[in-house]
Structures are given as structure tokens and as C-alpha cells.
Image (cartoon, helix red, strand yellow):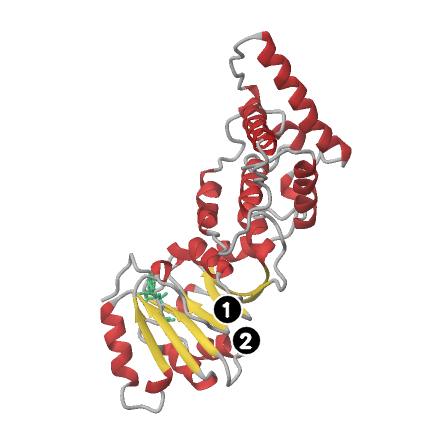
Amino acid sequence: SFHKSKGQHILKNPLLVDTIVQKSGIKSTDVVLEIGPGTGNLTKKLLEAGKKVIAVEIDPRMVLELQRRFQGTPYSNRLTVIQGDVLKTELPYFDICVANIPYQISSPLTFKLLGHQPAFRCAIIMFQREFAMRLVAQPGDKLYCRLTVNTQLHARIFHLLKVGKNNFRPPPKVDSSVVRIEPRKPRIDVNQKEWDGFLRICFNRKNKTLGAIFRQKNVISLLEKNYKTVQALKLSQEGPLKETETKMDLSSLGDCMDDESMEMEGGTDDDDYEMEVEDDEAKEVQSEFKGKVLGVLKEADFEEKRSSKLSLQEFLYLLSLFNKAGIHFC
Ligand code: SAM
């Protein structure tokens, strides 16, 4: 019997398994990471193609079945099975990742892989169709969202294959797609916390103009608070801006989808939200700071643009302009 909560939908079409392995471009020298090997249909083909397979599987019964399947075969000494939750497992070195995953871990797993160092060559992953289409979306596409921009910052992503429900047993409720994720080398150099804070604001209302988004009282007051903190730190010579991050931590990005699914069509209007202003002096400072923020948008002609149509390069450029003006998002 299969566990629904573990997303155990086994690939039953051997031709499809062959196609996935073919499209992966595995070399005979590759260490392959497989996530959620299940009963091992894909694992077997990966062992045929690569030098070594490391498989991470959460279900002890599946781990046993897998070990039984390859015991006493020429493959057994090239297969390492790690029992555990892939999200909580420290991943070993690998050249390429191939996986048919449970869809509920799509977002956190994607960012775990993208933060992994040293960067692997590519990952070939089966996702729910809509999630896959969000990953490969381009500016102006309906599914272009914060998840898209966040993943495309770290990787180039290609749609490889549409997969219908009936290739699985039991069949899932949704259609699937296989995508190829190639981490960018070198990485795009951007402060991760700044970037995350910036995109959360820009995609808060992705179809509104940036001018409208950055006029919101709560946005302005947040940015002003950050601004004052940075100024104070500068005065005390702490220099907070050049933080040396040794380890990439993208775990905060794992919730990209949650925001999206909470976004309501034509949602509530935050623009009319008025914040109580304590006294005239506070009001004055706030509007002066607002002018600074809007000045940055105007300077580069972003005021009338919308996040749903901005390219990755435009987001990076706008963030750099804000930072240059001393405006920070974390
Ligand atoms: N790879 C097999 C195939 O294609 O037939 C099985 C794929 S099935 C969609 C997903 C597999 O991932 C199941 O074997 C399930 O037990 C395992 N799994 C679920 N959650 C996991 C997690 N957090 N970490 C590792 N494996 C997990």
C-alpha cells in the first residue's frame, strides 16, 4: 500500500523512465543523486548510466525493498541509500540530480538544491505541471511570479517533457512535467536577504505599478526603518553592508508557493490603508523619505512598470539603484 502523504506515485511506464534518463545526459563518471527512489525503477537505469547513485528515501519500507532489489547484483556496491527526509539531510557531493519527487516538497527542495555547494551540473526533476510552468515562465506570462524570479536568479531552467497522470501508479490528481535546472556558474552576486525582501515587496501585488506599491504607507515606513538602522550603523562604523556569507542559505525562499496560493484574484486593496501619524515632524520626515524612494523609481523609469513584466536583469538593476541610494530591504 502506498502513503498518500509521502507522495508515493510510482512510475510504471518503462519508456518514460528511459526517456528521462536519456534526457538527463548522465556520464559514466557521474555521481548521481536520486531523491525518493521508491521501489527503484528509475534507480536501476541511473545505476546503468552513471558511476555511482546516492539515493535519499524517507520510507524505511522502501529502503528495505530497494536494498533487497539490488542485493547480490553488480550494482549493489555502486548504490548508497540514505534513509531520511531529504529536506533534513546534509547532501553529499553529486554531479547530477535525477528525481521523481513528492510534489509537496517542490519549493523547499528546489531552494535546497540551488543553495548546495559546490554547484552540481544539472538537476532533472519531475514536478507538478503548474509548478514546472512557474519555474520556466518569462516576464508577461500568467504564471510569472516571485518563485520564477527567485529560481531564475540561481539557475537556468528548461521544460523537457510533459507527463500525463496515467504514467504513475496510483495516478496523481495533477499532470506533471520534467524540467532541467542548471545552476548559474558563476553565481549572480547579490545579497540574498536584500533580494528576498525586495522581491516580497515587488510581488506583493504583482500586477500593480511599482509606483503604487512603493507609495504604500507600510512599505515606506518599513524602508525608512531599515534606512535609519543602516545610517546609524554607518555612523558607528560597523559597516553592515559587506557581510561575508560563507554558506548559502536559501531556506527562507522555500515558501514562495504559499504566498502565491494566498494571492487572491483582484485581492484586497492595500493602497488605501492609512497609517496613523504621531505628529507633524514624523509626517515631514516620512514624506521626505518617500520622495527619495519614488525618486529612485522615476530616475530609471520604473514607476509605471509592473513586476509581472519585469525581467530578472531589471529587478537586479532596480535593487542596485535602491541600495546605491542607501535604501535597503533587510
Ligand atoms: N522514484 C520512484 C518512481 O519514480 O517510481 C518513486 C517516486 S514517488 C513520486 C516519491 C518517493 O519519495 C516515494 O518513494 C516517497 O517515499 C519518497 N519521499 C517522500 N517524501 C520524501 C522526503 N521528504 N525525503 C525523501 N524521500 C521522500
Left of 69 or right of it: where is 132? right
The residue drawn where x is 59% and y is 42% is: 241
Left of 138 or right of it: where is 253? left
The residue drawn where x is 61% and y is 36% is: 207
Q: Are marks 1 and 2 in contact (CB under 8 Å)?
A: yes
Residue 53 showing in the rendered view: yes
The type of residue carrying mark 2 is: Lys
Residue 244 location, x and y as percent?
A: 55, 51
Residue 16 location, x and y as percent?
A: 46, 75
The residue drawn where x is 53% and y is 19% is: 273
Residue of label 1: 124
Instruction: Say which of 262 and 200 sits in front.
Output: 200
Query: In the structure shown, which secondary structural element does the residue marked by tag 2 occupy?
Result: helix
Residue at the front extreme, as displayed: 237
Residue 195's place in the image compared with 304, above or below, is below
Residue 59 location, x and y as percent?
A: 26, 66
Q: Earlier in the sequence, mark 1 or mark 2?
A: 2
The type of residue carrying mark 1 is: Ile
Residue of label 2: 23
Q: Quadrant of the N terminus?
A: bottom left
